[in-house]
Image (spheres, grey):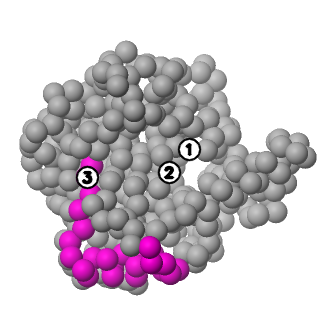
């Protein structure tokens, strides 16, 4: 096991901003196309499954190297949760997809990652420990192709990787999208890409106290979650995994899973979702407020600034997505 290191660094390509700008308009047009189908909504993670109220507690006995930003001192905050599917479409939950677990910790005060004061801290997590592609350009091309439908995706993969490579990538994409999923109440969720924790760099994991019971959850993730919640409040350990060296814990390559044997997760907080009236239709005032609110990895304290190219791209594209649904 290695000690957390402050010797991390970001590597920003000289053409990075040009790459971000190149795909800005195609992404905007695809979002507008989906808006015309479903009404105004997010570019990704469009389908809200549930809006929930929660508490986020920063624990007392945590390592000194974790005591920065939100985790500087013990405290308890109100939090807002948005559970979602990952795609651009509002498809049935039975369709393979990435699942999103977004947390907004409220009543936080401090300098923000975007250069202004912030009153909340957002964490956007998915049910994957890593991203499937190493850089933003590969990722956005896949998103754009997938957003146009399966024929467009298959065409893109064959053009990009050739005949044999295309078949391989189709299999990899299907495996990523179709990763077995038990429940929002029993799965780990991850930041996949790193953020800072003061002078350190970390990845985030949300680890549920409730474990899968072997039963099939069905095809409605919101209803499944509400059944778990009806049995009692749900709690999740909020954990940080620290950068130790550039090879094992790279900042810029989100396809590398940081090894727990060298950098184990440290529990620094606890998210608790109490029993509450759950609106499965997302039509209540609260559910609509959550749907209309902004969940953004860059809505963060300066001590928790997002890191790496994928995160830097998200700063541009989340802002653009927010403008398109305002």
Sequence-wise first label, 2 or 3 = 2
Q: Is residue 31 left or right of residue 264?
A: right
Disc 1 secondary structure class: loop
> How many angstroms separate mark 3 from mark 1 (CA)?
22 Å
* Residue 230 part of the magenta segment: yes
Dot 3 and dot 1 residues touching (CB under 8 Å): no
Residue 195 shows in the view? no
Residue carrying label 2: 128
Magenta part of the protein: which range? 214-238
- Left or right: where does residue 257 sit relative to residue 61? right
Instruction: Depth check: give the residue in front, 219 or 111.
Output: 219
Q: Position of residue 279 (x, y in %)?
A: 33, 82
In the rendered image, the residue lying farthest to the top is 7
Q: How many marks?
A: 3
Q: Residue 177's spot in the image, x, y percent?
A: 62, 59
- Front-most of 246 and 120? 246
From the image, tell me which residue sits under label 1.
131
Q: Residue at x 47, y 20 (%)?
A: 246
Give yes or no for contact between labels 2 and 1 (Cβ–Cβ under 8 Å). Answer: yes
In the rendered view, would you say 191 is above or below 35?
Answer: above
Crowd class of label 1 (few under 14; some 14 to 19; many from 20; radius 10 Å): some
Q: Secondary structure at mark 3?
A: strand
For disc 3, the marked residue is 237
**Separation of disc 2 and disc 1 at Cα?**
7 Å
> 258 or 295: which is nearer to us?
258
């Amino acid at each position: 096991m290695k000690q957390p290191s402050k010797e991390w660094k970001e590597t920003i390509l000289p053409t990075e901003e040009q790459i971000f700008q190149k795909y800005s308009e195609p992404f905007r047009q695809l979002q507008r196309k989906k808006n015309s189908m479903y009404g105004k909504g997010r570019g990704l993670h469009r389908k809200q499954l549930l809006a929930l109220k929660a508490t986020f507690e920063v624990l007392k006995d945590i390592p000194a190297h974790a005591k920065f930003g939100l985790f500087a001192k013990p405290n308890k905050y109100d939090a807002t949760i948005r559970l979602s599917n990952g795609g651009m479409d509002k498809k049935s939950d039975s369709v393979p997809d990435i699942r999103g677990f977004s947390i907004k910790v409220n009543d936080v005060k401090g300098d923000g990652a975007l250069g202004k004061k912030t009153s909340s801290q957002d964490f956007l997590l998915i049910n994957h420990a890593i991203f499937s592609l190493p850089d933003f350009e590969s990722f956005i091309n896949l998103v754009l192709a997938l957003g146009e439908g399966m024929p467009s995706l298959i065409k893109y993969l064959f053009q990009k990787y050739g005949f044999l490579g295309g078949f391989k990538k189709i299999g990899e994409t299907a495996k990523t999208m179709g990763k077995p999923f038990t429940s929002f109440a029993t799965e780990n969720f991850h930041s996949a890409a790193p953020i800072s924790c003061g002078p350190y760099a970390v990845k985030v994991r949300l680890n549920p106290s409730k474990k899968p019971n072997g039963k099939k959850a069905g095809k409605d993730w919101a209803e499944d979650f509400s059944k778990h919640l009806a049995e009692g409040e749900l709690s999740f350990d909020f954990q940080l995994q620290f950068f130790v060296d550039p090879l094992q814990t790279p900042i810029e390559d989100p396809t590398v899973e940081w090894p727990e044997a060298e950098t184990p997760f440290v529990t620094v907080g606890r998210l608790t979702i109490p029993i509450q009236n759950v609106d499965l239709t997302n039509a209540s005032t609260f559910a609509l407020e959550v749907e209309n609110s902004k969940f953004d990895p860059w809505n963060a304290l300066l001590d928790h600034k997002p890191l790496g190219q994928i995160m830097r791209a998200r700063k541009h594209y989340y802002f653009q997505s927010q403008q398109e649904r305002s």
